[in-house]
Image (cartoon, helix red, strand yellow):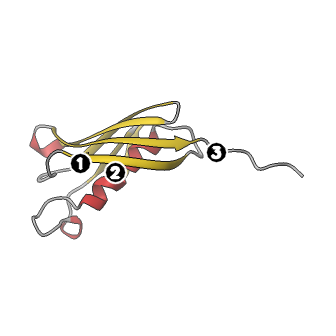
Amino acid sequence: CQRPGDGRATIPMRPDGLNASATLNGGLLALVVEEAALAGAPPGTTLASMAMRYAQPVRVGPAVAEAEVRDGLGDVVVRDAGRADRLAVIATTRSFAATPAPST
């Protein structure tokens, strides 16, 4: 998985990442959603929750995720770049900024 820019992440199609239907494994789609959400958030942010809706499988790839994050709430869309950017996943994430450790 790579983060090419703010709020974006991509994951290629590789034989070891496919399921029995020869489409990108759903766990890897969750990974690309998480990475895009974190790429669009301030450094040190942690992801608290993620809800995903699968629209279509990623058959050609790469899977490209784009996130828009505001006040810890992220809207993430994953598309199959090799199939004319067909919608694959719609996700919502919730994240929290890192809190400084208490001083002693």
Which residue matches tag 3? Answer: 98
Residue of label 1 = 63
Q: Is residue 103 visible?
A: yes
Disc 3 element:
loop
Distance from label 2 to label 1 (Cα)? 8 Å
N-term-proximal mark, 3 vs 1 = 1
Label placed on residue 14: none
Which of the pair 35/48 is nearer the observer? 48
Write down the residue under mark 2.
32
Kindly identify the amino acid type of the residue bearing the numbered disc 3. Ala
- Residue drawn at x 51%, y 43% is 95
Q: Give the x, y percent position of residue 64.
A: 26, 44
Q: Nearer the viewer, residue 93 or 25?
A: 93
The answer to the question of whether label 3 and label 1 lie on touching residues, with beta carbons closer than 8 A, is no
Q: Amino acid at mark 1?
A: Ala
Disc 2 residue crowd, few under 14, some 14–19, many 20+, Cα 10 Å = many
